[in-house]
Amino acid sequence: MNELNDWEKLIDEENEDGKLTEKQKRIVKAAIETFAEKGYSATSTNEIARKAGVAEGTIFRHYKTKKDLLIAIVAPVMSRLVAPFIIRDLNKVLDKKHETFEAFLRAMIENRKVFIKQNLPLLKILIQEIPFHPELKVLFKKHVAPEPLAKIKQLIKHFQEKGEIIDLPPYTVMRLAASAVAGYVIAQNLLEPEIDWDDDTEMEQTIQFVLRGLKR
Amino acid sequence: MNELNDWEKLIDEENEDGKLTEKQKRIVKAAIETFAEKGYSATSTNEIARKAGVAEGTIFRHYKTKKDLLIAIVAPVMSRLVAPFIIRDLNKVLDKKHETFEAFLRAMIENRKVFIKQNLPLLKILIQEIPFHPELKVLFKKHVAPEPLAKIKQLIKHFQEKGEIIDLPPYTVMRLAASAVAGYVIAQNLLEPEIDWDDDTEMEQTIQFVLRGLKR
Amino acid sequence: MNELNDWEKLIDEENEDGKLTEKQKRIVKAAIETFAEKGYSATSTNEIARKAGVAEGTIFRHYKTKKDLLIAIVAPVMSRLVAPFIIRDLNKVLDKKHETFEAFLRAMIENRKVFIKQNLPLLKILIQEIPFHPELKVLFKKHVAPEPLAKIKQLIKHFQEKGEIIDLPPYTVMRLAASAVAGYVIAQNLLEPEIDWDDDTEMEQTIQFVLRGLKR
Amino acid sequence: MNELNDWEKLIDEENEDGKLTEKQKRIVKAAIETFAEKGYSATSTNEIARKAGVAEGTIFRHYKTKKDLLIAIVAPVMSRLVAPFIIRDLNKVLDKKHETFEAFLRAMIENRKVFIKQNLPLLKILIQEIPFHPELKVLFKKHVAPEPLAKIKQLIKHFQEKGEIIDLPPYTVMRLAASAVAGYVIAQNLLEPEIDWDDDTEMEQTIQFVLRGLKR
DNA sequence: GATGAATGAGGTTTCATTCAT
DNA sequence: GATGAATGAAACCTCATTCAT
């Protein structure tokens, strides 16, 4: 947690926009670390305040309730989770004649791998807490649907029409591809963080598995 | 939650073994429901007691601490999670000449699907709480390794030697297969419980995907 | 506050009905004293607990919120405030030929004087807090209307028909009589508690004033 | 609260004297409204600041503590409460041969009725908070005694000597008259603000009641 | 074994007040 | 003068756990 991660940079940027004060940054940082480590419910505002080096009252000056703090933390990560799917010029990419499904899959995985690696604590919080907070579920659905879903559908269909991949319902294709990759990321990060994975090899095998599984 | 599920039967059985009293059963049932709904930390022993119709003190007569109650609940499900891999006569199955990888995969999936459907609340608790409780992680590792892992390795190798599946490290093979299936189960149960899935079709497509992806 | 007042006996009686535990009695007593002295808002549950010699948590075991405690305290005094007007055999009293308005007024004042003297802290709380708590206002109206109001109307009319008192609207008659008496009680108890009042004389003068003012 | 009330004009006047800045006026206005509605203790300085449209710190620049603000608000109303009794030329009024007790009573009631109507929130605060703040009690006594009390005594005696009213102790006379009027005002304003009172009739009946009650 | 009143530590939140800007 | 972020004490309330009955 010592290198400057994506979400730590994010906090800095937001500050430059005049959104977050110095103390707010410290509060958010402490909250992310502790929520990720112990879970939202098991984290006390007192502990967050201590870690952030601020008075407990300061937290509630910026976030009316503890849950507001949670939402303020996980809300931005949601939009950035599906960001690549709503890139305006995605169409241009698809128009490139030479663009294959494999190239696309590799590019997408590479892009998201970086995102995930840099937002791991935030994603951990997101995944852990979504089942228990209807507000988060609502937010999540707002971000995921319908624009990104339409884009994904469009993408899959594009490659199906080119005859590169099998003719399954687009969401099924997406689920299968995403499961394989997510399964690897989860295994690597959450279940067995102590194992020394040969990252490139495992990922390559996963990609090949998906390509074979989706080949027409 | 009104039909008699797997874990409710389990509770009954344990009682017949003289292990669980009537009140204990009610406590465990109430705890499972509430832990699954709100998470362990956000559940109060008072609420469990109310739901179970017992006095709060009664809980602590049977389980020294709240965490003991959690462990008592999730521990048994762990052994039963990997149960099919440690069946004593699994070898006999493998010896059958006509047994193909596809048949094995289908049988295994069917078997676990039933298990998952009947233990969903328990599995939800297990997945949610494992990251926050070292004790659970220890228990988990104790159950998963090494006997079941050895069995799995043995199984994968068996089918690789028969030339049915690709020559990847056994754990990688397992990860890829498990991810595809788990990805479907999670999507179906947690993310989109309101959608009406065509269960058989989706599962068949998933199996075909795995088979293609692992074909030599 | 050292002699055994009406409301202290009330607490005892409720206990005999099995309603109030020993600690609850102490809590209620401490709350009454402190609410009367400092007002509801300015009284902390911590102070009540200390005065009652119980843990702060104990208060909340018996009364879910601080406001519940307030209501539990003032609610019973309301019904007893209008109690004499809903006495079942009040009619018999009225039938007595020799019963005059003066006799009735004197009896009523005497009766209420005792009540007020013995419930002074409770009435102080009631008067102070009613303007700020809609719940209390609702409770108050429920107790005052409509049975007692009908009885009062009936009483006034009775004496008006007998030609003893002036022909004003019954509620006006009541207001005038009550104001005179209440004005004395308030002056005596709240405004100038240090003055040594000649109680009998003042009250007699007040009664004579009301009788003259209402004489036909 | 939209018409320009007495106390709002008071605030303006004080400003013209250079006493109250624009922001101070807004603070005082907001404080009066909120204290009257919720009581002093239950009102937070934060709420006052928000209603006044100033920063919280601004309140404390003008009033060292929250209680200072309360005193600054209720102190002036006290002197004006007893103002008519310390009018310098009251004696002249009394010298008028034709001036009767009834005329005096009516004039006084009319004068105070206007005052009360225009200072209702302030009087509500005064009445509510006096029991809990020794400082206010001290202030009150300073204003009420001894000059006004002497004037009242003198007035009552004057009408007693003229043989217009009964020979009771002057304070008793005052109490009886004041109780009748105050009883009406309180009933009208605090207990039953929703009822549509026939104001003139009720007041006339009240005056007649007092006159009969005090007639020699 | 079962109860539920009692506890006190600790939870979240509010508050009057201060102070650097 | 005015601001509003910051404070930390204290408010109300919850909780897991204990223990006399």
Image (cartoon, coloured by chain):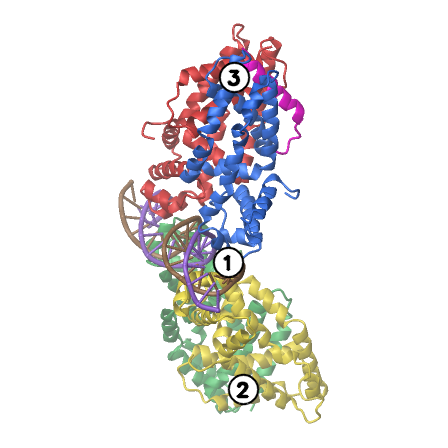
Chain colours: A red, B blue, C yellow, D green, E brown, F purple
What element does badge 1 sit on? loop
Q: Which mark is residue D4?
A: 1
Q: Is residue E20 left or right of residue C151?
A: left
Q: Position of residue B117 (x, y in %)?
A: 61, 34
Outermost residue on the top side: it is: A98
Please tell me whether residue C182 is drawn above or below residue D12 in the rendered image.
below
Same chain letter for marks 2 and 1: no
Separation (CA) of disc 3 from disc 1: 94 Å
What element does badge 2 sit on? helix
Q: Which residue is mark 2?
A: C206
Separation (CA) of disc 2 from disc 1: 40 Å
Q: Position of residue D190 (x, y in %)?
A: 55, 68
Q: C35 or A216, which is in the foreground?
A: A216
Q: Residue at x 58, y 85 (%)?
A: C210
Q: Which mark is residue A91?
A: none
Q: Which residue is mark 3?
A: B158
Separation (CA) of disc 3 from disc 2: 109 Å
For mark 1, does the 10 Å Cα neighbourhood hold few (<14), some (14 to 19), or many (20 or more) residues?
Answer: few
The chain that hosts pointer 3 is B
Q: D129 or B83, which is in the foreground?
A: B83
Q: Which residues are magenta?
A: B193-216
Quadrant of residue C45 in the image? Answer: bottom left
